[in-house]
Image (cartoon, rainbow, N blue to C red):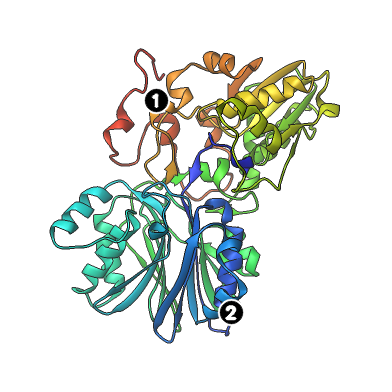
């Protein structure tokens, strides 16, 4: 897991992948490699579904991709087309029944579905469906989507029409890959909140959450799926249906801040360049006199390089990350949390001792781990620690596929910057402005959702999203 399993970091929900082969590719293994490349998007469970001769079979389990899939399992998952999924739960508990892809039987056969995102009206739809006799096997909102498609499929001539009807009912974020006995489909919500792209491997089309998955299997990037678009891939090639789009697209800007891999491109913008630019603008907006710049692994490093280049202050490797600490690491008890941080991350005393240090990180959510990392630098002999955050203060909960705490647990929703600085123990603390942030994804074809920073949600959300988190605190 990235960022040494920091418990106070925001977590994305899922990564999806799909392929329909026209060249006798080993689709199960290609999907396995692609999911490996997307592992950063979810580490709780994963699964692969394949279409073989019109029958859809699947394998899924709790755990990381290499833990769930052996060579034997992949050999048994042979077929012409496949979809895959890695999951981090935001809706529905971390249980095997909530792992994806979902494989359902309906009137016209089988369908497999993998979903990245989150619906804000899933509960209301689910309740209505249950009142009409629907039975759900999981607690995830993805099953609501599958149920709607299967129901509308019985009243329409094509699955494309059923999907278009479903899209009129659901509200929220979704990037979907759907496998049927003769098609592979990709769907993106009308706002484009979650990413989805199209690639080609020889004459075979693929779909993926990020371009890094295309790179992993040697596929060439073709284009991004547009907001509100239904992409249909079959033996006849690729077709597209454009459903009604919103006036302004709202890609989640946290994809560029933290979620996506730095080697990915999303809607025309390089993730690496966006993070580098964030660090550069951070140095312009918040200069400070110091001896060196360091980044918190892994996502803070690129921004730190940008800060260093713009400020002229040398960059140094400030931390060594223990890359062998994984999911099974036994967490210390509450009284030994500092030990847990030191096992996963250690400060480079030779570089830091006697120096005034600028430490760059991508965000602060609760602030607990930031405090411990600042103390690591103090213990390594830093004379000053200036914490620079390459995004604005996170003040509002997300309802579109990011696992944010309730507002009362978001430090910036309850405290001023000065108060947070004192809590963390830094000599200074500053954030990138919202205006600066939206300039960082250079070349992006879409607009951005910034609701976790400014509270301006692109659609109606549960009531908590519009309430103050703490009595007496002015959010402005």
As drawn, 169 above or below 406: below
The image position of residue 99, as x and y in percent, is 43, 59
- Up the image or down, 268 lies above or below 183; here it is above
Label 2 CA crowd tier, 10 Å (few <14, some 14–19, many 20+): some
- Residues tagged 2 and 1 counted as in contact (Cβ below 8 A): no
Q: Residue at x 39, y 25 (%)?
A: 408
Q: Is residue 426 left or right of residue 418?
A: right
Upstream in the sequence, badge 2 or badge 1? 2
* Local SS, label 1: helix
Dot 2 corresponds to which residue?
A: 26
Q: Is residue 214 above or below residue 296?
A: below
Residue 202 seen by the camera: yes
Q: Is residue 306 visible?
A: no
- Would you say 384 lies left or right of 52 here? right
Residue picked out by circle 1: 408
**Residue 341 x, y percent position in the rendering:** 66, 32
Across and down, in percent, residue 120 comes to: 30, 46
Disc 2 is placed on an element classified as: loop
Quarter of the image that includes the C terminus? top left
Residue placed most toward the observer, 320 or 76: 76
Q: Which of the pair 309/24 is nearer the observer?
A: 24
The answer to which image quadrant residue 285 occupies is: top right
- Give the residue at x 27% y 66%: 149
Residue farthest bottom in this picture: 53
Q: Residue furthest right?
A: 350
């Amino acid at each position: 897991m990235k960022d040494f399993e920091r418990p106070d970091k925001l977590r994305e929900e899922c990564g999806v992948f799909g392929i329909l082969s026209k060249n006798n590719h080993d689709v199960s293994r290609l999907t396995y490699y692609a999911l490996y490349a997307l592992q950063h998007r979810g580490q709780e469970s994963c699964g692969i579904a394949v279409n073989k001769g019109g029958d859809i079979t699947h394998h899924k389990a709790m755990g990381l991709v290499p833990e769930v899939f052996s060579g034997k399992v992949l050999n048994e998952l042979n077929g012409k087309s496949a979809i895959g999924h890695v999951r981090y739960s935001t809706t529905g508990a971390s249980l095997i029944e909530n792992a994806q892809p979902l494989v359902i039987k309906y009137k016209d056969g089988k369908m497999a579905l993998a979903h990245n995102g989150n619906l804000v009206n899933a509960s209301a739809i689910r309740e209505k469906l249950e009142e009409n006799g629907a039975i759900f096997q999981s607690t995830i909102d993805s099953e609501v989507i599958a149920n709607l498609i299967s129901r509308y499929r019985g009243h329409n001539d094509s699955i494309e029409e059923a999907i278009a009807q479903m899209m009129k009912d659901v509200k929220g974020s979704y990037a979907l890959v759907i496998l049927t006995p003769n098609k592979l489909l990709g769907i993106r919500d009308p706002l484009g909140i979650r990413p989805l792209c199209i690639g080609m491997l020889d004459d075979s089309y693929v779909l993926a959450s990020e371009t890094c998955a295309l790179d992993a299997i040697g596929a060439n990037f073709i284009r991004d799926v547009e907001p509100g678009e239904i992409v249909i891939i079959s033996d006849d090639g690729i077709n597209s249906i454009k459903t009604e789009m919103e006036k302004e697209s709202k890609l989640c800007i946290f994809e560029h801040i933290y979620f996506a891999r730095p080697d990915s491109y999303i809607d025309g913008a390089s993730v690496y360049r966006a993070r580098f630019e964030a660090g550069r603008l951070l140095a312009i907006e918040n200069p400070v006199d110091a001896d060196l710049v360091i980044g918190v692994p892994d996502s803070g490093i690129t921004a730190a390089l940008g800060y260093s280049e713009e400020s002229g202050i040398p960059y140094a490797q400030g931390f060594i990350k223990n890359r062998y600490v994984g999911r099974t690491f036994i967490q210390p008890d509450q009284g030994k949390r500092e030990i847990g941080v030191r096992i996963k991350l250690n400060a480079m005393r030779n570089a830091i001792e006697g120096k005034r240090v600028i430490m760059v990180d991508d965000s602060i959510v609760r602030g607990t781990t930031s405090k411990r990392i600042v103390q690591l630098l103090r213990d390594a002999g830093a004379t000053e620690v200036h914490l620079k955050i390459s995004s604005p203060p996170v003040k509002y909960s997300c309802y579109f596929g990011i696992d944010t705490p309730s507002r009362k647990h978001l430090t910036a929703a309850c405290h001023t910057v000065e108060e947070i600085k004192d809590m963390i123990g830094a000599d200074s603390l500053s954030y990138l402005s919202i205006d600066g942030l939206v300039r960082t994804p250079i070349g992006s074809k879409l607009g951005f959702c910034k609701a976790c920073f400014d509270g301006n949600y692109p659609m109606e959300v549960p009531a908590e999203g519009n309430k103050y988190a703490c009595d007496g605190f002015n959010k402005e």
